Image: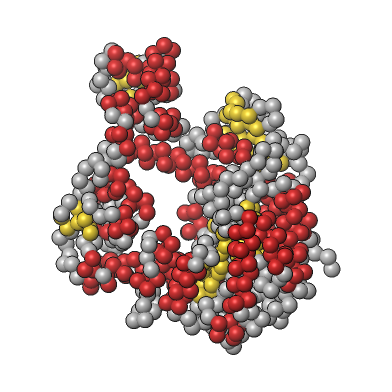
């Protein structure tokens, strides 16, 4: 039976939704007069779904038919689910029409493996050619490279796409062997290495690439995960690593049971740690170690690090360098920049930070303001930890006019 | 002394001129005459072209580009009582341009913050604005925002919808940014009739809603977070939040 376009959209976006990557940032404005589409350096969120995630790209699979049988994946061949496929023309038309209405920033195109790796990549490529050459579309296009497809196909995709990715999914080879018998880490990383080399042949700025790791499906610790991310960033292979809390969708002996809740807090902490690696100048071995291989669930990784390195604090905010300011818990990039800007004009006190709308909830225990330190707490890790985790004081309710008891003294 | 002016940028410049040359020393500047009795002399400032232009040229000449632009941007923030802050800002600026980056001065900080809020709204709207396709193919979007960001949006879309005809209609302010081959810029909207949509419009808005419903992951549902990221205020004209 031939499916109508709405059913196809329903099936193919449903199948793609577990891919978390949806950013459209990091590419320069590139509009051309008389053509359609441009990318925006900061990225633009076009809407947010009921689970609170940003929608920036039309994220769909070209098809969810797949010849692979990966345990964690909803589209694996042994699953009995509704299958559908877009034709390249159909998908290109939807993309253009969505773009014109400002629904989306561009396309995120991935696919199940239909017939063979090369055939799948060829279909994706056909969609890209229609968009770029025929419709002269300059918006954002993210393509998932198909591991194992021909180098020539990858080369053309790299020249047409804004970003490419290939998902490692599982942080160790052992787990891959167990859950995704058709994949190995080498096989997954190979297209990314190819892609980088191809893009370097043409320009000196390599195409931006990303990958995704599934968290909580297998027993790897945060240490192993962050060590892997850090290595990928250091080699400048990747721009982003995404972490996806494993949501049990398949009932499989090798996986956590289907009633397990997704480890959302752990995912959140990993993203915080990832930010420390990319923007705050931290090394992964500062955040996690053999002694504490997993991130603290109660405290954010920076606060946790600071409490373990309390001898480095308090830091005088009027003298500290930008890098030092960034290491103070509760002070982020904006806060640090504001401090640098403001202290050219006066010596900053704690009240000044409040006036500058910099949060001092956590920072107050780690800073000196013009030689003065907070006096409520002794400078010990356990005291500070306790204070940070204490539940916020309940607000006293204001009596209302209609609350007779206060007026008449009834208790 | 309390000053009254009509709320326009030009008249405000006249006010600046009078303050310097007629030695006005205001405690408050109002856009509208108050309903209640004032215990203070109310002095109304009227637009004066020569005075206004003189101040405009002085600002252009003496203020750094970004400081000058900040003044213009502040005037896009409708409904905020920024006048006293802006007056202090201008007085400070004529003495020292460097001080205008001193965010430890409360009025400088407030103006920086206000400008940032304006940019924030503009950025959000660049994602949340929704176009509908009209019969002859023109794209049409309705806009309702706290501050006036129509011009910013018009420029933003002139890059990405370069080969399209489009209209962004600011409903509250009766203005529209028009982008056609012949004309690009802001126009006043005198009268307005609900336009006819193209045949394909319904199909794509339905397709978009299908997509929007289907990408949400049920086991991660978090409507509270969604309310923070797309506040109800912004949802009025967003296709996916509209009921048929």
Q: Is residue B68 above or below residue A77?
A: above
**Residue B9 percent across, percent down from the top left:** 43, 23
Q: How many marks?
A: 0
Is B215 on the left or on the right of B50, as rendered? right
Seen from the viewer's position, the closer of residues A216 and A11 is A216
Is A141 on the left or on the right of B63, as rendered? right
Q: Residue furthest front?
A: A201
Q: Residue furthest bottom?
A: A253
**Residue B27 percent across, percent down from the top left:** 26, 25
Seen from the viewer's position, the closer of residues B194 and A340 is A340
Looking at the image, which residue is at 76% across and 41% down? B198
Quarter of image, res A381 = bottom left
Looking at the image, which residue is at 58% across and 77% down? A185
Looking at the image, which residue is at 72% across and 65% down? A152
Is A151 on the left or on the right of A204, as rendered? right
* Residue A27 showing in the rendered view: yes
* Residue B28 showing in the rendered view: no
Quarter of image, res B194 = top right
Looking at the image, which residue is at 54% across and 33% down? B151
Q: Is residue A245 above or below residue B135?
A: below
**Residue A216 percent across, percent down from the top left:** 50, 78
Is A74 on the left or on the right of A296, as rendered? right
Seen from the viewer's position, the closer of residues A306 and A297 is A306
**Residue B100 percent across, percent down from the top left:** 32, 34
Q: Is residue A161 above or below residue A78?
A: above
Give the image's coloring scheme.
secondary structure
């Amino acid at each position: 039976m031939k499916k109508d376009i709405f059913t196809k959209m329903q099936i193919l976006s449903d199948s793609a939704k577990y891919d978390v990557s949806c950013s459209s940032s990091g590419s320069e404005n590139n509009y051309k007069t008389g053509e359609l589409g441009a990318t925006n350096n900061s990225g633009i969120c076009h809407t947010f779904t009921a689970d609170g995630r940003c929608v920036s790209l039309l994220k769909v699979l070209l098809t969810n038919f797949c010849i692979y049988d990966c345990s964690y994946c909803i589209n694996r061949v042994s699953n009995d689910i509704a299958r559908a496929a877009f034709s390249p023309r159909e998908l290109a038309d939807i993309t253009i029409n969505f773009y014109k209405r400002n629904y989306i920033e561009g396309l995120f195109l991935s696919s199940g493996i239909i017939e063979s790796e090369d055939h799948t990549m060829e279909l994706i490529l056909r969609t890209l050619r229609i968009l770029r050459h025929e419709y002269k579309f300059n918006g954002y296009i993210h393509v998932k490279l198909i591991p194992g497809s021909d180098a020539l196909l990858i080369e053309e995709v790299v020249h047409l796409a804004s970003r490419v990715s290939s998902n490692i999914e599982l942080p160790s080879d052992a787990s891959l062997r167990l859950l995704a018998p058709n994949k190995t880490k080498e096989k997954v990383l190979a297209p990314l290495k190819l892609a980088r080399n191809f893009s370097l042949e043409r320009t000196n700025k390599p195409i931006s690439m990303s990958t995704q790791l599934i968290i909580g499906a297998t027993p790897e610790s945060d240490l192993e995960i962050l060590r892997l991310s850090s290595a990928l960033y250091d080699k400048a292979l990747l721009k982003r690593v995404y972490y996806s809390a494993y949501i049990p969708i398949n009932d499989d002996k090798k996986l956590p049971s289907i009633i397990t809740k997704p480890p959302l807090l752990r995912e959140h902490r990993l993203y915080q740690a990832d930010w420390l690696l990319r923007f705050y100048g931290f090394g992964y071995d500062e955040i996690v170690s053999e002694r504490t291989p997993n991130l603290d669930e109660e405290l954010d990784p920076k606060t946790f690090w600071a409490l373990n390195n309390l001898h480095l604090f308090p830091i005088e905010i009027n003298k500290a360098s930008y890098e030092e300011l960034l290491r103070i818990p509760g002070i982020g990039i904006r806060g640090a920049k504001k401090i640098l800007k403001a202290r050219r004009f006066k010596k900053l006190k704690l009240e000044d930070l409040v006036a500058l709308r910099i949060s001092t909830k956590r920072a107050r225990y780690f800073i000196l303001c013009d030689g003065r330190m907070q006096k409520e707490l002794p400078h010990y890790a356990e005291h500070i930890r306790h204070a940070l985790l204490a539940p916020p004081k309940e607000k006293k309710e204001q009596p209302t006019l209609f609350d007779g008891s206060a007026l008449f003294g009834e208790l | 002394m309390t000053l009254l002016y009509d709320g326009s940028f030009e008249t405000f410049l006249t006010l600046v001129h009078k303050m310097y040359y007629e030695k006005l020393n205001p405690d408050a500047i109002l856009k509208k005459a108050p309903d209640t009795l004032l215990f203070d002399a109310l002095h109304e400032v009227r637009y004066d072209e020569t005075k206004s232009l003189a101040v405009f040229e002085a600002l252009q000449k003496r203020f750094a580009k970004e400081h000058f632009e900040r003044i213009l941007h502040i005037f896009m923030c409708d409904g905020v009582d920024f006048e006293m802050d802006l007056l202090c800002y201008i007085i400070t600026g004529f003495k020292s341009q460097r001080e205008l980056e001193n965010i430890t001065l409360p009025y400088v900080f407030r103006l920086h913050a206000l400008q940032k809020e304006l940019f924030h709204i503009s950025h959000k709207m660049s994602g949340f604005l929704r176009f509908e396709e009209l019969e002859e193919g023109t794209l049409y979007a309705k806009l309702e925002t706290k501050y006036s960001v129509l011009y910013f949006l018009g420029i933003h879309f002139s890059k990405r919808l370069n080969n399209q005809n489009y209209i962004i209609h600011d409903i509250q302010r009766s203005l529209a940014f028009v982008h056609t081959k012949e004309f690009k810029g802001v126009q006043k909207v005198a009268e307005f009739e609900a336009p006819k949509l193209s045949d394909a419009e319904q199909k794509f808005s339905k397709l978009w809603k299908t997509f929007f419903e289907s990408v949400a992951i049920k086991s991660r549902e978090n409507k509270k977070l969604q309310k923070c990221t797309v506040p109800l205020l912004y949802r009025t004209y967003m296709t996916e939040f509209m009921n048929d």
